[in-house]
Amino acid sequence: MRLTDRTYEDWLEHTFGHEVRIQQAAWFFDQDRDWWDPEPAVALAYLTQLFEDPEPSLRWYSDSQIAQGLTYLVNTSASGDNGWFCSTAVPIEARVRCVEAVASLFAQLFVPRCTLQAHLSETDAGSLNGVCYMWWDGLPCLALPGDPNLRTMQETTLRTMARILGFQSPACQESALHGLGHWHRNHDRQVCTIIDGFLAANPDIDPRLISYAKAARCGCVL
């Protein structure tokens, strides 16, 4: 059933309250599932509220439930692209605020809970680590070619990744580098500037993270 009218609290329970199955597909792949499909302005308002101050909203859920819920909301491999971020019907200020709020989500949720570098596969990174690492890979389209605010959304996203790269968290730094590596193809100058600044400011970080940063600088990430 298509869900279009939910309070913020009901939306949280719908998104994060499901059981995390063992060795089975997540609930959002069930054929008879309910799915959240509000107007884009409502979707971005709820996402912004969650991203800007995640702890009060997520305090009752386990890390695995949070990972599952975030995957459902913003990973196109789970729910496809609902067109919320790229909708020109939403004021650009609201779209920018939602993207900028991702940095707050990283600072308040991923920094304290994610400690491993997922691309190294040293141990089981855990589901929340995986969401952190793949965040920019799965994120829906932020703006379409004909959007008059395309450049604004692109600059906002690059600025947000740069901010996250500055966090003292290997997991978050890795995520930002991963995202920047994928953006290198169309934004090579900006990506190189951001990563060069990061490397210059952090000469003593884990050598493996330095290697990953150098790979991202030329777009060599998976």
Image (spheres, rainbow, N blue to C red):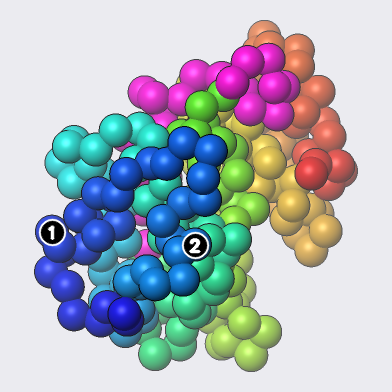
Tally of marks: 2
On screen, residue 30 above or below 89: above
Horizontal side, residue 54 vs residue 145: left or right: left
Location of residue 150 (image quadrant): bottom right
User: In this orientation, which residue lies closer to the viewer: 77 or 192?
Assistant: 77
- Name the kind of residue labelled 1 in the image: Glu
Estimate the x, y position of residue 2 in percent, counting from the top left: 32, 81
- Answer with left or right where residue 159 lies relative to residue 191: left
Mark-to-mark CA distance, 1 and 2: 23 Å
Disc 1 element = helix
Foreground residue among 218 and 38: 38
Q: What stretch is highlighted in magenta?
A: 98-124
Question: In the rendered image of this protein, does residue 165 appear above or below residue 41?
Answer: above
Query: Is residue 118 a member of the stretch shown in magenta?
Result: yes
Of residue 36 and residue 215, the one placed in the foreground of this image is 36
Amino acid marked by disc 2? Phe
Say which residue appears at 42% left-offset and 46% top-offset.
68
- Please tell me how crowded label 1 is: few (under 14), some (14-19), or many (20+) other residues with Cα within 10 Å: few
The quadrant in which the N terminus is found is bottom left
- Residue 155 appears in view: no
Packing grade of label 2 (10 A; few <14, some 14-19, many >=20) is few
Question: Considering the image in quadrants, where does the C terminus appear?
Answer: top right
Within the image, what quadrant is residue 140 found in?
bottom right
Image x and y of residue 126, in percent: 51, 27
Q: Which residue is drawn at 45% across and 87% down?
A: 88
Q: Residue at label 2?
A: 29
**x and y percentages locating residue 6 in the rendered image:** 17, 73
Q: Name the residue under label 1.
A: 9
Q: Does the magenta stretch include residue 121?
A: yes
Marked residue nearer the N-terminal end (1 or 2): 1
In the shown orientation, is residue 59 left or right of residue 157?
left
Q: Residue at x 64, y 90 (%)?
A: 146
